[in-house]
Image (cartoon, rainbow, N blue to C red):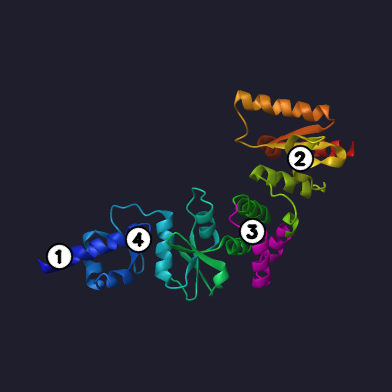
Amino acid sequence: MRDLVTSERIDAELAAAAAKQHGVFSFKQVLEAGGDSSIVRRRITSGRWLRLYPRTYAFAGHPVTFHGRVLAACLTAGEWSFASHTAAADLWLPSGTTPEVHLWSPRRVRSAGITGHIGRLDKADVTRLGSIPITRPERTLIDLASTLARDTLEGTLDEFLRRELAQLQRLERRLTAVGGRPGVRHLRRLVEERRGSAISESELETRLLRALRQNGLPAPISQYEVRDGGHLVARVDFAYPHAKLVIEAYGRGHHSTWTDQEHDLARQNELIVLGWRVIIVTWWRLQNARAPLIRTIARALAA
């Protein structure tokens, strides 16, 4: 009876710990609760516990989320281990996918489902997201720079900046600190392009800017305010003031109600009356009719 009471108490303590850790707990916590390797074997054999990675577990019947798998990997790797790369990116910017678990650790990690990167990170590069030790957004971007294509990296950078998770000034400092890691040159160039300019407000805007740059067209001014005297007529996505040309990016979630559409039309009419020309860019046109779209913008600039 005493053994039963003791084991139930251990289960209760571990359940309380797991509730704060996305449903997972470590062998170290088993020991701290008064258990040992024998109770682990009994619980695994009876099906009450699940082994996620070496020395990390979860209670059977409780779904293990991506957050739980990442934290379990960090607990397996030991102290000073942090979620990183695509795992960190998906924790900062949830995508609904389940990427592979990556982490930085000062020791080699050998376990299926975990990609370990050996190294000891600077304190300036790490933090906690709830209970999960993780690389800061700026360090996450630096790590991703060595694995992502330039276009994907650019979109990820802009999303971090849009959500105010990363700061350009801090990112520049960390780029200087890490030196010549793979991909840093590309990331540094993207940062330089954004210094002193407004950050695009959507992925469509990021892709449009990239298309303009790749086709040799000058970069427009982002989030430009068109005024009539002291009156603000419109804050447009992009503008070439010297050519009085406005480009508006209508994303997938653009205004769809009747009143919103009427407001947009009235706004465009005001711009036209003031002598501005307006080009509308949609996802479909940028994806499926990019060449004629770029030609249209180029002709408008030339005119």
Give how far apart the Cα atoms at labels 3 and 2 are. Answer: 24 Å
Q: Main SS of the magenta segment?
A: helix
Tag 1: amino acid: Val
Q: Secondary structure at mark 2?
A: strand
Mark sitting on residue 225: 2
Provide the residue designation for mark 3.
Answer: 167
Foreground pick, 131 / 93 = 131
- Distance between the Cα atoms at labels 4 and 1? 22 Å
Give the magenta part as a residue range: 164-191
> Between disc 4 and disc 1, whose residue precedes?
1
Residues at circles 4 and 1 in contact by the CB criterion of under 8 Å: no
The x and y percentages for residue 129 are 47, 59
Given residues 66 and 258, the one toward you in this image is: 258
Q: x%, y% of residue 244?
A: 84, 37
Q: Which residue matches tag 1?
A: 5
In the displayed structure image, the side of residue 194 where residue 15 appears, left or right? left
